Image (cartoon, grey):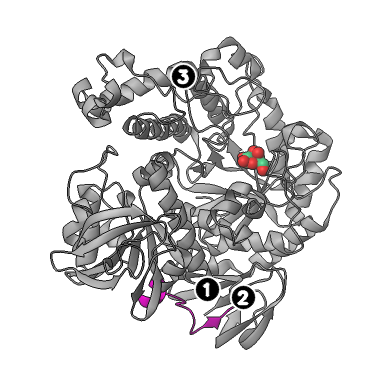
Amino acid sequence: MDKGNILQGDRIILGTCYYPEHWDKSLWEDDLKRMLANGIEVIRIAEFAWSKVEAHEGEFDFTFFDEFLDLAEKVGMKVIFCTPTATPPAWLTNKYPEVLNARIDGTLIRHGMRRHYNYNSPKYQELSAIIVEKFAEHYAKRPCIIGWQLDNEFNCEEWEFYSESDTIAFREFAKKKYGTLEKLNEAWGTTFWNQTYTAWEEIYVPRTTPGGNNQNPHYFLDYKRFIADSVCRYAKLQSDILKKYIKPGDFITTNSLFGNMDHCRLTKESLDFMMYDSYPNFGYCLDNYKNDIPTLNDRRWSINLAETRAISGKFGIMEQQSGSTGNHRGMEGPAPRPGQITLWTMQSIAHGADYVSYFRWRTCTMGSEIYWHGILDYSGRDNRRLREVGEIHKKLTKLDEVAGSSYRAEVGLIKEYDNCWDSELDVWHGRIERASQAAWFNALQKSHTPFDFCYLDHMTVEQLSKYKVLVYSHAVILTEESVAKLTAYVEQGGTVLFGCRAGYKDKTGKCVMLKLPGLIQELCGTDIPEYSYVAPDDAVPYAEWNGEKLPAAVFNDLLAPVAGGKVEAEYRDAYYEGTPALISKETGKGKTYYFGGTFNEEAAAVFLRQLGLAEPYREAVELPECCEIAVREKDGKSYLFVLNYSKEPVEIKLNKTVSNLYTGATESGTVMLPGYGTSVYRL
Ligand code: GAL
C-alpha cells in the first residue's frame, strides 16, 4: 500500500468530506490548500454525483471529476472516491420505476430525497454495475486516489424494503434456505392462524396486515435476515467490480452503522475495513437516544465505536461531526463548543480509529442539509472550528506511536445478529435487551472499565479467550453452535454471565419445549421452573450476594439448582422470596453465572465489582465519573486516553509517573484536565 495511505499503523490521519459539485470551481484550489494547511490530507468525494458523469443514460462524460482530480494531484491531496449509487438520477428512476423502494402498502418511494432504490431490482443491479465499472475503469488508476467507498450509508433512512423485486428475491432466499414448502411452513409455524403456504408465489415481503406489525414473528425474523443478505449481495456486486480496477494497496470501505445489516459479513465479503459516521451530539439532542441511555449524552457514542471495532478491528471515521446538526425534526443540535471537536475526535481515536474525516468542509448553502454544518459556515471564511481542527492535527503528530495499537478490554459483551433482530421484533425480548444494554454500558463507563462487543458467530474460541468474563445479557435464541463455543470458552478458563430469559427460543424464533434455560441448563446448573415480569405494583426485587444488594429488575427467572449448580443468592422480595436468583457452576477451568434478572445499572455494577472487573487501571489513574478512559496497546506499550466529557475542569490522580504524549512531559500526582479536555499518556 502507498506510504501515505490511511490505517497503515504508522500515523493518525485527518480527512474531510468534500463536494466539488456544490461549489464554484474557482473555490476548489483554495479549499484544498486550506485543508492541507490545517492538517487535512484526505478528502472523500462523489458519493452523490452520478449525474455529473452520466447525465443521460449511456452518455458518459468524465471531465468534471478529471478536472478536480488533476487539481487534487497538483496540490497533493489524497482522495477517497465513492460509487454514486445512493442517489440514482431522475432519468433513471423515471424510466425504470422498478428500481424504487416501496412502503409496506406498495406505494413507491420516489425521487426527491436519497436512498430511494431497492437492492434487488435486476435493473438497478445492472445500472449500478455499469456506473461502478465506468467510475472504476476511468478513475481507479489516478495517483491521488487511495481508496473507495461503496455507496453511502447502506440502510440509512430506509432499512425495510417492500418492492416487487424484493418479493421475488425473498422467494429465492426462502427457497434456498428451506428447499421445500413443508420445511418453510414448519420453520415459520404457519399452522398458527392458518398461514400455511401452498405455493412459493403466495410468499411476499411483509404487506399491510391487521394489528400493525403483529405478523408471524418467525417469518419476520427471516425477512430481516433477507434484508441483511440483500445489502451484502449488493455491496459485493460493487466491490467485485472495483477489485478488478483499483491500484494495489488501495482499499474498499463503506460508512455505517445501520439497522437490518450484518456488518460482520459485509466487512468480510466486500471491504478492507469498515468506517463509522460519528455524530456524538445526537446523544443528547435526539429523543430516541436520550430515552435509551439517559445519562451519558455524547459519551454514549462510545457504544457505537465499540460496535464498529467489533465488526472491523481496524476502522476509521468517515464522517466526524464538526458543526451543528440539522434538518430533521429532533436532530437539530448546537454547535460543538470549544474543545468538543477535539474531544469527539479523541473519542474515536481512543476506541481504535486511526483515520478521522470531518463531515464536511463547507456547510451547504442549498438543499436538504443547510443545517448540517461542516467545519466552515456558508461564507467559507476561516473560523474557530477550523482553528480547532488545526490544533487537533498538531496533537496527532505527537501520537504516531499510538497508530496501529489495539483497544484493550477484559470484559466482552456478547452479541449475535439473530438475537439483535429478535429483540427488535419481540416486545418482551426488546424490553429486557434495551434495559440491559443501557445498564452495562453505563456501569462499565462509570467504573472506567473498558469493554468490547463480541459477535459470537464471527469469533473463534481462541479470540474469545482473551476476555476474563463474557456477558450474554439475554441469550434468548440459542443454537448448538453458540453453546458449544461458550462451553469451550468456559472449559479453558473463562467466565460467562447470563441474564434472564436465555435459551427459550430456537433459531427460527420459536419457543423450545425443553426445560429452561434450554441448551445451557447443563452448563449453567440451573432449571427455571417459573418466570414472570416484575409486576408494576411490586418494587424491584433484589437478592443479596456476598453482602451486596443485587437488584433483579424488569423480568425474573425463578431458578432451581440442578447438575452441580450452586445457589449464590436468593430473591429477598416478591412472592418468590427465598427462590434462587443467581446460580453458579464450575465447568473445566471456568465458571458460569446465571442471573434471573434483567440488568439495571446497579446490578451490572455489582457484577463488575464481585467479579473483580471494575476499574482495571486504578493503579495508574483515578478519575471522576465524568471521564472516560481507554487503553490501546502495541509492542508491549500501553497508551492511556483520558476524556473529560464535562464542561468543567476536573482533577485526575496519576498514581504512576507517566509521559504525556501531547507535551512530551512526565506527569504524576494530581493534574487538572480542562472542560472537554483530553490527554494521552504512555503508561
Ligand atoms: C450522514 C450522511 C451524509 C450527511 C450527514 C449529515 O448520515 O452520510 O451524507 O447526510 O449524515 O450529517
Residue at image position (53%, 70%) is 446
The residue most toward the left is 563
Res 121 label = 3
Res 639 label = 1
Give the residue type at disc 1.
Tyr
Residue at image position (27%, 69%) is 578
Marks 1 and 2 sit apart, C-alpha to C-alpha, by: 9 Å
Considering only order in the chain, which callout, 3 or 1, is on the residue closer to the N terminus? 3
**Which residue in the protein does label 2 denote?**
661
Secondary structure that dominates the magenta span: loop
Question: Badges 1 and 3: C-beta atoms under 8 Å apart?
Answer: no
Give the residue type at disc 3.
Ser
* Quadrant assignment, res 531: bottom left
**Residue 504 screen position, x and y as percent:** 26, 47
Marks 1 and 3 sit apart, C-alpha to C-alpha, by: 48 Å
Residue at image position (60%, 77%) is 624
Query: Of discs 1 and 3, which sits in the foreground?
Result: 3
